[in-house]
Amino acid sequence: MSLTMTLTLKPGAMTLSELRSVWNAAGPLSLAEEAYPVIEASAAAVQAIVAKGDAAYGINTGFGLLAKTRIPDDKLEQLQRNLILSHSVGTGELMSDAVCRLIMLMKIGSLARGYSGVRPLIIESLIAIYNAGIMPAIPAKGSVGASGDLAPLSHMTLAIMGVGQVRVKGELQDAAAALQAAGIAPVVLAAKEGLALINGTQVSTALALHGLFMAERLLEAGMVAGALSLDAAKGSDSPFDARVHEVRGQPGQIAAASIYRQLVSDSAIRASHLVGDERVQDPYCLRCQPQVMGACWDIINNAARTLLIEANAVTDNPLLFKDGELSVVVSGGNFHAEPVAFAADTLALAIAEIGSISERRISLLIDATLSGLPPFLVRDPGVNSGFMIAHVTAAALASENKSIAHPGSVDTIPTSANQEDHVSMATYAARRLEDMAQNTATIVGIELLAAAQGIDFHRPLTTSPHLEHVHEQLRQKVPFYDVDRFFAPDIEAAKGMVLRGELSASCKELFTALHP
């Protein structure tokens, strides 16, 4: 999707492609016209309940353990405002614009399905600040993933109320001033609207989607770097034989092996050692790449399916349903983000494994007894240390990821005076994916540098056409490592290629089947 193309949101029918486009870049957003009648009917149902005077949780009662406290009609607006102010207790660094865009998009989509009882004004206000580039200032910490992402979504809601700070073009501004500059009136929340805005799993899901989209890039980059390492180490492509993978039947493995075969096809380096190579089998980090990366592929796609369902879901509480001619209020627990927590935990496993096997290939390449390359991938070793400590960095990050990958979903801590006695920890489970992805991107970036160095040592022989293109792209940013130099900028340049998806972009057609 181009930046000038408007995304017309169809509640309950968003696609992963649309979510990726919003994550990648800002662009105008609109709501499908057919959504408005159900939104208006839901808001009218809330007003009818208020007028009738029956107690209904979150509409004219307190919240959580205070649900039995009845609130007078003349204090319902104050109830909703107080709810947002008291729940805006997040801490830590602010979430990125990319994550904030996903949060707002999914909250708009959820409310617009017509089960939450908010006026069209609320949804239109969220769309207006989104389109104006006004990003809520949402601290990253402070949610346990049930009863919804209360604290971070409260900070989101402050933005349309004109309270606190927002971020515009990367700069923090006073929210009221930013709204005024954009010609947007602050909203006054009516009955139930504050609760509908802050109940839900949109923050956990946005963070998990952020991790998902980074994991997709890491998977692609890890496969490209791994194929380059295979040629640098003069490994065999026989383990990628389609027959080997078909008899096992794992779909990700079969697809990964196909990509590896195409990545290394027509390599002159491979042709040079087809005859007379004394080695019988390669180490697992080369030989078992389809098995490892294919398994990562499968669980990434499984997580994607769960997160797409959640992105389209209605997850606040209570919900309004039609029962004949009447509207009924039903309290449930869709705000419990256990599906998101499990998805995030499996993404953590994939991200850790992509980095783990990449680190092993770096170790192989710098070991002259295994790779046949100069020690530590540098001429005149001893005077030059080459890739010695770059590998140490990769090892440190791979080890760190092992600790961070501990599942968040197995933890819980009771809150709200034991009313909310089992929580998902989905927000942390998803939030930690960013750190893990940064670690793995660094590892894969170091492998890319090491593998490219190995390819250079085999000149004038060339690798495959696909991998020669990757090598050329890297060498435009990072020259051959001839003698020791300040190495950190090289690693950052290679890491940037990984995070931006530039490695797979060099051979994009091979990865078209990767993502649902």
Image (cartoon, rainbow, N blue to C red):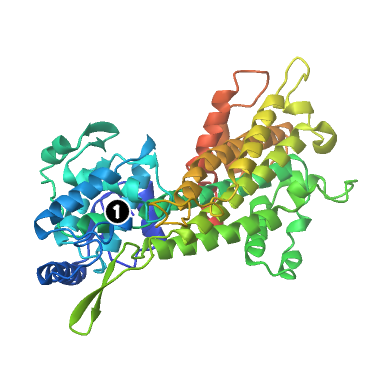
Q: Residue furthest bottom?
A: 324
Amino acid type of the residue tagged 1 in the rendering: Ile
Comparing 221 with 69, the one in front is 69
Q: Tell me if I can see residue 280 in this picture.
A: yes
In the image: residue 90, left or right of residue 230: left
Q: Position of residue 500 (x, y in %)?
A: 47, 42
Q: Position of residue 348 (x, y in %)?
A: 57, 49
Within 10 Å of the Cα at label 1, are there few (<14), some (14-19), or many (20+) other Cα atoms? many
Residue positioned 57% across, 32% down in the render: 475
Q: Position of residue 146 (x, y in %)?
A: 41, 55
Rendered-image quadrant of the N terminus: bottom left
**Residue placed under numbered mark 1 in the picture:** 198
Q: How many marks?
A: 1
In the image: residue 87, left or right of residue 499: left
Residue positioned 31% across, 49% down in the render: 153
Where on the picture, by quarter, is residue 94?
Answer: top left
Q: Tell me if I can see residue 460 in this picture.
A: no
Relative to 365, is 114 above or below?
Answer: below
In the image: residue 366, left or right of residue 311: right
Relative to 181, is 77 above or below?
Answer: below
Relative to 486, is 358 above or below?
Answer: below
Where on the picture, by quarter, is residue 293?
Answer: bottom right
Residue positioned 10% across, 43% down in the render: 183
Relative to 178, is 244 above or below?
Answer: below
Say what secondary structure mark 1 lies in: helix
In the image: residue 488, left or right of residue 482: left
Comparing 14 with 221, the one in front is 14
Q: Position of residue 229 (x, y in %)?
A: 70, 42
